[in-house]
Amino acid sequence: MNVFTPSSVAAKLAAVSAVALGSLALAVPAGAETVAFQDARGDIEHGADVRSVRVVNEAAVRVKVRHDDLVRSFRSGSGIKVFLDTDRGQAGPEFIFLGGTFEGSDYALVEAEGWKPASRRAEPLECGYIMKLNYADDLAHIKLDRDCIGNPDEVRVAVRTSGETDAGFVHDWLGDRRELTRWVARG
Ligand SMILES: [Ca+2]
Ligand SMILES: [Ca+2]
């Protein structure tokens, strides 16, 4: 009996492509690109120490920052800056999301120029964005409407946290100072 009949070959090809499709489906969830980045623990003697950052580029752009130990008290003086690079044609980030990460603090999205707010009195942009803080899990969830940041196809970020200690303010970057993640394409 010849096992290499056209039908058995076709069946084997079908089985192979089913496996290939299955693994692709697992690797790339429909409609979402999510990339996670890790950072060392203990860079600063403060709970604002960055542990990891997750960037999601889909219907909205979302950045989730895990800290070592986020606390509610204003005494932590803890804060965050997320620099958003949305245009390869322009050097550096186009936007900065900045805010406090202790309870009751405020936040804003502003246009950036040279890694700083575009003007000394940069007005917060009036569009849809929100930060939610989870003190149990030490997370800051930032969600930005696409229209707020020019509806980019791809985005990358640099993240800097800060906190107050007896010795003054300390800060921690994801990776190195002003290090941008790889580009995250829209899912
Ligand atoms: Ca760190
Ligand atoms: Ca840019």
Image: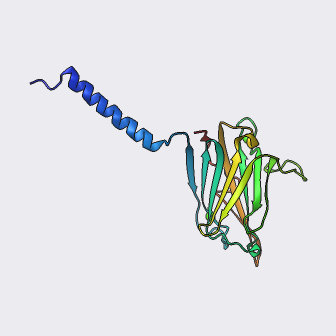
Q: Quadrant of ligand 2?
A: top right
Question: Can residue 135 be seen at all in this image of the molecule?
Answer: yes
**Left or right: where 72 falls relative to 17:** right
Dividing the picture into quadrants, the one containing residue 77 is: bottom right
Q: How many marks?
A: 0
Work out whether residue 42 or residue 53 is closer to the camera in this orientation and state it: 53
Q: Position of residue 127 (x, y in %)?
A: 78, 46
Q: Residue furthest bottom?
A: 166
Q: Identify the residue at horizontal 49%, vertical 43% (top origin).
A: 29
Work out whether residue 81 or residue 148 is closer to the camera in this orientation and state it: 148
Dividing the picture into quadrants, the one containing residue 98 is: bottom right
Q: Is residue 25 above or below residue 133?
A: above
Q: Identify the residue at horizontal 51%, vertical 40% (top origin).
A: 30
Q: Quadrant of the C terminus?
A: top right
Q: Position of residue 170 (x, y in %)?
A: 73, 69
Q: Residue furthest left?
A: 1
Dividing the picture into quadrants, the one containing residue 1 is: top left
Q: Identify the residue at horizontal 66%, vertical 69% (top origin).
A: 70
Q: Residue furthest right?
A: 121
Q: Residue furthest top?
A: 6
Q: Position of residue 64 (x, y in %)?
A: 63, 56
**Left or right: where 27 falls relative to 43:** left
Q: Identify the residue at horizontal 18%, vertical 22% (top origin).
A: 5
**How is colour applied across the structure in the image?**
rainbow
Question: Can residue 113 be seen at all in this image of the molecule?
Answer: no
Q: Position of residue 122 (x, y in %)?
A: 87, 51
